[in-house]
Each structure stands twice: as C-alpha cells, then as structure tokens.
Image (spheres, grey):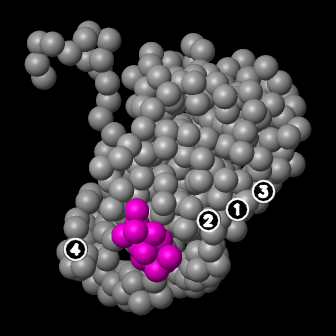
Amino acid sequence: MSLFLRNVHRDLPAYVPGTHEEGSAYVRLNTNESPFPPSSDVLESIARESINLNFYNDPDCTSLISALSAHVHVAPENLMVGNGSDQVLQLAFLAFADGFITLPDITYSYYDLFAALYGIKLRRIPLESDFSIDPLKYWNAGSMIVFPNPNAPTGLALTPETIQGILEHNPDQVVLIDEAYVDFGAETVIPLIDQYPNLLVVRTFSKSGSMAGIRLGYGAGSAGLIADLARIRNAVDLYGVNRLAQAAGVAACSNWTYYADNCRLIMRERARTTQELRAMGFTVLDSLGNFIFAKPSGIPASALQQALAQRGILVRHFSGPRTEEWLRISIGTAAQMSMLIDACRQILKTVV
Ligand code: PMP
C-alpha cells in the first residue's frame, strides 16, 4: 500500500469474486453467469454500433430507456440504467444510505464494500436457521434496507406481499430489492413502485440476459427516487453506459423470447440437479436463482470444491461459520450439469 491513500480507505476490505478462469477448459459454475451466449440480435447490434465508437454515447440512454420501458412495463421516468447493476447499487448507497444500512448477515458480499467505501455502517440481521429471511425483523428498521430477492447465495425468495409489509413498515426509508436473479422463478416487485415511493428495484442483464461482460443494469422506482439517482450518477459517471452496452440492451429488450426460453432451461436443470444431489445425500435449498446452495454429506464442502476443480469444474465456497459447509453451484447447460453430477458421484465414492 502506498503512503498516499486517504486514511479513511485504509481498512477497505477486498471483494473476492469467484476465480476467473478464461476459456473452455473449465466448466464455470462459480460466478452465476449464463452458460448461453447473447442472442444473434444482440451480436449484430453491437457490430453495427461499433462504427460509431468515435462519438460519445448518449448519457441519457434514451433509446435504451425506451426499449426497457416497453420490456418491463414501466414509464421511462421510473427507470435509470447503470454500468452493471453493481453501479446502480453503489449509486443507491451513495444517494440514500444515511448512517447505516439494514441487510441480512448472509447475502451478496459486495454490499459490504460499498458501505465501507462510503463510511456506512451495517446492521446485519441473521437469517433464520433454515436460511430464510424473517420479514418482521425488517419492520421499522430505522435505515435503508437492502437485500436480493431471491437472496444470494441461498436462492430463497420472499413473495411480493411479504415485501409489501416491509415497505409499509418503513415508509421513510428506501427499501432496495436487488432482483439480479428474479427471472428464474421468483416474482418481481416492480409493479409496486407506483404504490411505494420508497421502493427501488435493481436488475441486471448479467444473468438472465447473458451479458455479464457488457456491464448493464438498471433501477426502477418512483420518479423522485430515479431523479435523485440520476443526479448522483451524472456527478460520478455521466457516460457510464457505453454505446455497445446501450445497443445490446435495446436489442435484448426488443426480443426477449430467446432469454425467456433460456431461463426455462436453467430452471429445468436446477430442478434436475437439486433432485440428483439430494439423492446423493446433499441438503439442497429450494433455490429460485440460477444457482443452488448445497451442503454435501460425507465430505467437507471445501474438499469437494477442490476435488471438482481438479476435474475442471469450478463451484463457489464461502468460508464463514454459517456457510463453510455449503457450496454455491451455478446452473449451466444440461451437459455441464451432467458432468457436475457425475463428478460428485465419483468423488463421493472415493471418500466412503
Ligand atoms: N446483485 C447480486 C445479488 C449479484 O449476485 C450480482 C452479481 N454477482 C450483482 C448484483 C451484480 O451484477 P452486475 O453484473 O449487474 O454488476
């Protein structure tokens, strides 16, 4: 560390992403990406747009907002886009978190980092012993509330009615629902934004949209919240969403059928993998994400992770007292999941 970093940042924790191994040598089930490539529409629109890269991009993302508006049935003034949903989340922390944030103890770990960067304290509410969120513990929180629905890495989701209860009991606080994984079977709360001016829904094209590498996310909320967020965004990163990302987003929104079909394939493989691992003695939560949270039996989770890695299959292990016995396994193609299931079977045979 150099002598120049401001003192306030000296204790900034490091975010630890899933290991990033490029290339087809690995089956990447460790970063919750889509195993499917972007649609041909998206690839063509990127190629077409690249001719204009000498010109600055539209900072207001007008075409993208209008395509998104038609796609999610929300008026343009209720939408803002960012450079990945991580940027939208970060801007929301910067804009709305005053003092502290209330969030689950086991959740998306990048929230910790945004909070640390902006000097925001965390009030962590432990998940129940079955890893569910008790919504009553979020009533009258006294601060901005953040959690993903479905939660990560558990995959467990709350119903819109339950989230409505949290919104009603925190009318003076922003309630941020991170819907990164909502397209895999949970129900969105976007329709509630008209009723609750304190609701901010954040979404991404990185998972169901097969575009983790383009960095495109968005927020949906009341016109007031969105105007505040846009104001902060314009102060930090006016041209954040580049031309290629904007063109790709328009193309994806305009023809979502391919992506909806892919989500169905993922959900089918999730059900099959859950069933097969349970038959091998794993405990597997009922996930509504594009991943499962699974606890092996007869072998420590970290040992299974390493044994799978030796066979070229990457899965995610989180150290920490409540998660160290579990693995988060992203759902890939049918062929990839068959490889995972076979590998688990072989590894378990060698340890019994
Ligand atoms: N929220 C959650 C819960 C996530 O797991 C992730 C991705 N790891 C993100 C947000 C960030 O996604 P993006 O690629 O849009 O920044």
Q: Disc 3 or 4, which lies upstream in sequence?
A: 4
Marks 3 and 4 sit apart, C-alpha to C-alpha, by 37 Å
| Drawn side of residue 272 relative to residue 216, left or right | right
Indicate whether 293 appears above or below 65. Answer: below
> Which residue carries the number 4 mark?
23
> Which residue carries the number 2 mark?
253
| Drawn side of residue 221 relative to residue 61, left or right | right
Q: Answer whether residue 206 is magenta in the image.
A: no
Amino acid type for the residue under numbered disc 3: His
Query: Which of the numbered marks, if any, corresponds to residue 73?
Result: 3
Task: Choose top left, top right, bottom left or bottom right for residue 133.
Answer: top right
Range of the magenta residues?
36-49
**Residue lying farthest to the left in this orientation:** 2
Between 243 and 322, the one nearer to me in the picture: 243
> Which residue carries the number 1 mark?
71
- Quarter of the N terminus within the rendering: top left
- Magenta span: predominant SS is helix
Indicate whether 80 appears above or below 207. Answer: above
Between 324 and 260, the one nearer to me in the picture: 260
